[in-house]
Image: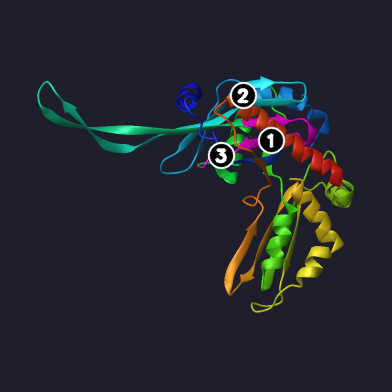
């Protein structure tokens, strides 16, 4: 599937000559068992390679489902690159052809096949996953497809140990800009999930709380006093506990949702859609160059996060 789809793009790749975005996710590995002694896992790249091997596919969508797969994977010392894509059979459509021998137009009904392929990269530093965004890709369908592929592959291992999660790295500036644009803030919901193997100082206390209680996740929901009331935006943004939740969410150890009103109309924030992105300059039609560009975007994202830490 993947070779055929990629071949259709090789003449002039869809990313040729245009600016593109790389969607930034984190690969989180959570234990299938509460016994930590049983949660033994290979190093990240070896683990990813194991579970993606075997030609697995995943489906997204309902009426006209897309079949996703990865292929053409290559490993370096601290990274992996490859191609992620989908194809699907569309509805039957009439196709008209002219028969010169019989001077006759004939009509046949055929299913049209559509597809899209894009480079991806995995970086050990930060456990980042980056996927170049094709116009048919959304942050959520990419996450759903990759998560399904990883978890299906995990289920085929002799002793499955891990629940994989492909979670969006947040862009704090997007959330703060959204807060600042509102006339009225009615609700903010923070979710923090376990495990967190490398807790940052900002949310280490949350990590200690969730561990001590043996919980899977902690949620904090803040709502205004009434339908016409508003939360204090500055207080929400500057509260220490909220800052801890937000830091965890931006590092993809959870997520943040929000509701409010702007110019009298409902305005929402969903981190699963407002994902961090890294801009890539125009490329040629060379797929290796595109892989390298995705990897470079991940390295820049990881470097900035280290600088902030």
| Residue 89 vertical placement versus 259 (above, below) | above
Instruction: Tell me the residue that label 2 is attached to.
Output: 288
173 versus 194 height, above or below: below
In the rendered structure, which disc, 3 or 1, sits on the residue that comes first in sequence? 3
Residue 83 picture quarter: top right
Q: For mark 2, does the 10 Å Cα neighbourhood hold few (<14), some (14 to 19), or many (20 or more) residues?
A: few
Q: Residue at x 62, y 71 (%)?
A: 261
Q: Residue 154's image quarter? A: top right
Q: CA distance from mark 3 to mark 1?
A: 22 Å
Q: Which residue is mark 3?
A: 18
Looking at marks 2 and 3 on the same chain, the residue that comes earlier in the sequence is marked by 3
Q: Give the secondary structure at mark 3.
A: loop
The front one of 286 and 189 is: 286
* Numbered label attached to residue 205: none
Residue at image position (47%, 27%) is: 5
Residue 263, relative to residue 269: is it above or below?
Answer: below
Q: Secondary structure at mark 1?
A: strand
- Farthest residue to the left: give it: 102
User: Where residue 199 sits in the image (x, y, percent)?
Assistant: 85, 43
User: Is 131 covered by the magenta stretch?
Assistant: yes
Residue 305 in the image: state x and y as whole percent: 81, 43
Q: Are marks 2 and 3 in contact (CB under 8 Å)?
A: no
Q: Residues within 10 Å of mark 1 (few under 14, many from 20)?
A: many
Report the residue marked by disc 1. 129
Report if residue 223 is visible in the image: yes
């Amino acid at each position: 599937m993947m070779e055929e789809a990629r071949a259709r793009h090789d003449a002039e790749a869809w990313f040729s000559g245009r600016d593109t975005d790389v969607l930034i996710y984190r690969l989180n590995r959570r234990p299938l068992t509460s016994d930590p002694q049983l949660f033994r896992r290979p190093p990240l790249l070896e683990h990813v390679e194991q579970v993606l091997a075997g030609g697995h596919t995943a489906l997204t969508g309902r009426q006209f489902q897309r079949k996703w797969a990865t292929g053409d994977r290559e490993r370096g010392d601290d990274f992996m690159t490859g191609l992620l894509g989908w194809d699907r059979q569309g509805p039957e459509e009439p196709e008209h052809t002219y028969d010169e021998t019989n001077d006759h137009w004939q009509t046949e009904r055929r299913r049209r096949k559509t597809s899209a392929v894009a480079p991806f990269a995995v970086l050990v530093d930060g456990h980042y996953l980056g996927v170049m965004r094709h116009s048919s890709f959304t942050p959520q369908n990419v996450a759903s497809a990759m998560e399904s592929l990883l978890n299906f592959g995990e289920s085929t291992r002799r002793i499955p140990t891990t629940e994989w999660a492909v979670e969006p790295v947040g862009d704090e500036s997007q959330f703060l800009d959204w807060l600042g644009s509102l006339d009225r803030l009615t609700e903010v919901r923070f979710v923090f999930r376990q495990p967190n193997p490398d807790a940052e100082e900002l949310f280490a206390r949350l990590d200690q709380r969730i561990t001590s209680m043996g919980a899977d996740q902690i949620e904090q929901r803040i709502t205004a006093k009434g339908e016409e009331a508003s939360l204090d935006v500055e207080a929400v943004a500057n509260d220490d506990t909220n800052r801890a939740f937000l830091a965890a969410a931006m590092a993809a150890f959870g997520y943040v949702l929000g509701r409010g009103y702007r110019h009298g109309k409902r305005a929402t924030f969903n981190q699963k859609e407002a994902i961090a992105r890294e801009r890539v300059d125009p490329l040629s039609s060379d797929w290796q160059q595109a892989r390298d560009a995705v990897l470079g975007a991940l390295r820049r994202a990881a470097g900035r996060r280290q600088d902030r830490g």
